[in-house]
């Protein structure tokens, strides 16, 4: 009989009595079904446990079994290509154990304990190792080599090392004796607590962009590798679709996609799409470098709160191997709602809109784990975090959006009117911003063109001018505007429809390399400059519009292949010819 027994049950919050042996953040098993839980409060003889499974059937008097360790994940080869629930249990194995409806009290490790991996051992008996030393590796997928590193806090002399061979994740590969005579066993897999950030060498400045192939992001509102961004927007504005595009096309080595409180059909769609897609870099299935975590809206709310830490811990694990990881969290609003519900169960004092007073600090804990770092091994790795926010009614003044803006430097604001007009991505160019643009300017100048930033700024200025002019047009119409302002409106239309709008389902337009993005901007600005010269000589704008060259530029995103940019020469010649034809007719 356990010394700890359940005193009361209030949804996922369980009060436990029986002594003072339980510590904060300890993992426990609650009830006769051994439901997984975590200690969240200790007050004398009364302990509060947050249970991550459905608590139906729990009753006062049932035992609670402590583990004496914090909530932790078993991390090792086998994570890639898999799909897990919010606390790191593989859903395929859960389905095999319980059927289509997931059972409770099934404690399945994240990794296959029976599978063997062909491993190469890099240390030998007598070697001295320190935190970050590579001691073993195996080929996890054709694209990713799994690198096992000595964890923080372990150093000393190797007293035993196995030869190269095929081993399970729990086989002891290396034994290290430290200065105090304690022997540490190193395996392919290791357990890591999820609540705290993993150790690293030092943070590095953000200096490289995460290339996504989405024009409005890469050009106007770039995000740096190791940065943090938010995608807020109302229902139906395209948050999930935008994140799917980023997961498919961004130049990160590994994608961790976290479905936090989303509908089950959205996670099903993500799983099916990712399984069918080919990685554009390797030609192999995209799932070979993707990890999915699904905590859908019908799963226990407490596990939703833990799911963001589960995803972040996995991302940091691969970062420490020197990989570049992008974490997509969809959505942090559902996570905040889980915090609110649990806070209410704990009878804590509510703050704005019922959210707990510590909402801001929890968001900070999550986003600050993003970063470009030097690992303990001395390699470079990053975790880029892109979190979707779902404000009710599209109100960006609500607490989750406002607090998120305090801790991110890239804000992609989705707009309902753009989505209803079928303009995708529906990122509004006037409400969005990126603070990484200045830091990334040298990279664009060196790797794309010195003119890239100048073109970007001119495009942004034209869009800003159009927004101001449209306020006048709404009041008095466009007919009384001077010709140069009419030209600004027309060229902004070309920018919006031909450059910012992007078709995720078009073979050519779904992903656009930076060189093509630059060529598109140069074509649009070329037309603007040449037409502006004519307008300043009192040539009516309508004559330039009649040539059809404006509409032709709207369609160039579909006409120019990504691997053959020579057709831009034809567009430049078409612009020159059309403008010259109008100029001659007015000479």
Image (cartoon, rainbow, N blue to C red):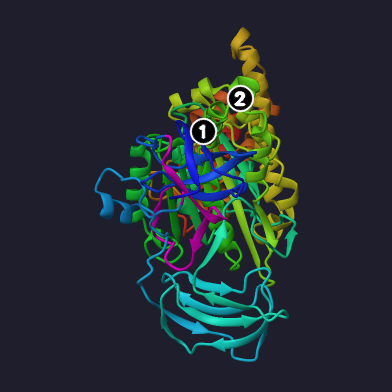
Residue topped by disc 2: 396
Residue topped by disc 1: 338
In the rendered view, tell whether residue 543 sits above or below residue 273.
above
Q: Position of residue 564 (x, y in %)?
A: 47, 59
Which residue appears at 56% of the width and 77% of the height? 185
Q: Quick one: which residue is furthest to the left in this view? A: 99
Let me know if residue 587 appears in the view: no
Q: Position of residue 413 (x, y in %)?
A: 58, 32
Separation of disc 2 and disc 1 at Cα?
A: 19 Å
Mark 2 or mark 1: whose residue is earlier in sequence: 1
Q: Position of residue 142 (x, y in %)?
A: 41, 72
Callout 1 crowding tier (Cα within 10 Å): few <14, some 14–19, many ≥20: many
Which residue appears at 50% of the width and 24% of the height? 416
Which disc, if any, is residue 245?
none
Please state the extent of the stretch shown in magenta in the rendering.
60-87
Which residue appears at 38% of the width and 55% of the height? 90
Let me know if residue 364 appears in the view: yes
Give the camera-side residue of 138 and 488.
138
């Amino acid at each position: 009989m356990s010394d700890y027994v359940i005193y009361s049950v209030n949804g996922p919050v369980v009060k436990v009595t029986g002594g003072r042996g339980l510590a904060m953040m300890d993992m426990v098993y609650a009830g006769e079904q051994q439901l997984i839980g975590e200690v969240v409060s200790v007050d004398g003889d009364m302990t509060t446990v947050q249970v991550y499974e459905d608590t139906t059937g729990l009753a006062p008097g049932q035992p609670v079994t402590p583990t004496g360790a914090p909530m932790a994940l078993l991390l090792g080869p086998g994570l890639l290509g898999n799909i897990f629930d919010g606390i790191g249990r593989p859903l395929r194995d859960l389905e095999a154990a319980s059927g289509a409806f997931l059972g409770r009290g099934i404690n399945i490790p994240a990794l296959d304990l029976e599978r063997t991996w062909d491993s190469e051992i890099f240390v030998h008996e007598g070697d001295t190792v320190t935190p970050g030393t590579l001691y073993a590796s195996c080929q996890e997928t054709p694209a990713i080599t799994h690198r096992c590193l000595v964890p923080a806090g372990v150093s000393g002399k190797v007293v035993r090392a196995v030869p190269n061979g095929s081993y399970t994740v729990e086989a002891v590969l290396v034994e290290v004796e430290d200065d105090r005579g304690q022997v540490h066993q190193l395996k392919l897999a290791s357990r890591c607590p999820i609540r705290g950030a993993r150790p690293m060498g030092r943070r590095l400045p953000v200096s490289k962009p995460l290339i996504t192939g989405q024009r409005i992001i890469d050009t106007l509102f770039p995000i740096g590798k190791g940065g943090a961004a938010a995608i807020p927007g109302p229902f139906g504005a395209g948050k999930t679709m935008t994140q799917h595009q980023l997961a498919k096309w961004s130049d990160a080595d590994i994608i961790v996609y976290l479905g936090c409180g989303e509908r089950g059909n959205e996670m099903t769609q993500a799983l099916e799409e990712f399984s069918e897609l080919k990685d554009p870099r390797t030609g192999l299935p995209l799932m070979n470098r993707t990890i999915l975590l699904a905590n859908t809206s019908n799963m226990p709310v407490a596990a939703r709160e833990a799911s963001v830490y589960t995803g972040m811990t996995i991302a940091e694990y691969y970062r420490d191997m020197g990989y570049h990881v992008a974490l997509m969290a969809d959505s942090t609003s559902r996570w905040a709602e889980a915090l609110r519900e649990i806070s209410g169960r704990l009878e804590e004092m509510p703050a704005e809109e019922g959210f707990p007073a510590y909402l801001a600090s929890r968001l900070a804990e999550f986003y600050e784990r993003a970063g470009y770092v030097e690992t303990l091994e001395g390699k470079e790795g990053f975790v880029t975090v892109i979190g979707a926010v779902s404000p009710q009614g599209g109100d960006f003044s609500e607490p989750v959006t406002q607090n998120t803006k305090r801790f991110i430097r890239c804000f992609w604001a989705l707009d309902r009117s753009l989505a209803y007009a079928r303009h995708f991505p529906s990122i509004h160019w006037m409400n969005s911003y990126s603070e990484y643009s200045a830091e990334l300017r040298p990279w664009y100048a060196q790797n794309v063109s010195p003119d890239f930033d100048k073109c970007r700024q001119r495009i942004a200025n034209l869009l800003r001018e159009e927004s101001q002019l449209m306020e006048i047009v709404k009041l008095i119409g466009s007919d009384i505007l001077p010709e140069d302002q009419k030209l600004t409106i027309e060229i902004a239309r070309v920018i919006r429809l031909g450059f910012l709008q992007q078709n995720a389902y078009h073979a050519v337009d779904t992903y656009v390399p930076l060189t093509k993005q630059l060529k598109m901007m140069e074509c649009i600005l070329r037309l603007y400059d040449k037409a502006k010269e004519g307008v300043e000589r009192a040539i009516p704008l309508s004559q330039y519009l009649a040539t059809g060259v404006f509409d032709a530029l709207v369609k160039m995103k579909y006409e120019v292949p990504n691997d053959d940019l020579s057709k831009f020469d034809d567009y430049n010649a078409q612009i020159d010819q059309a403008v010259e034809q109008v100029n001659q007719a007015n000479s």
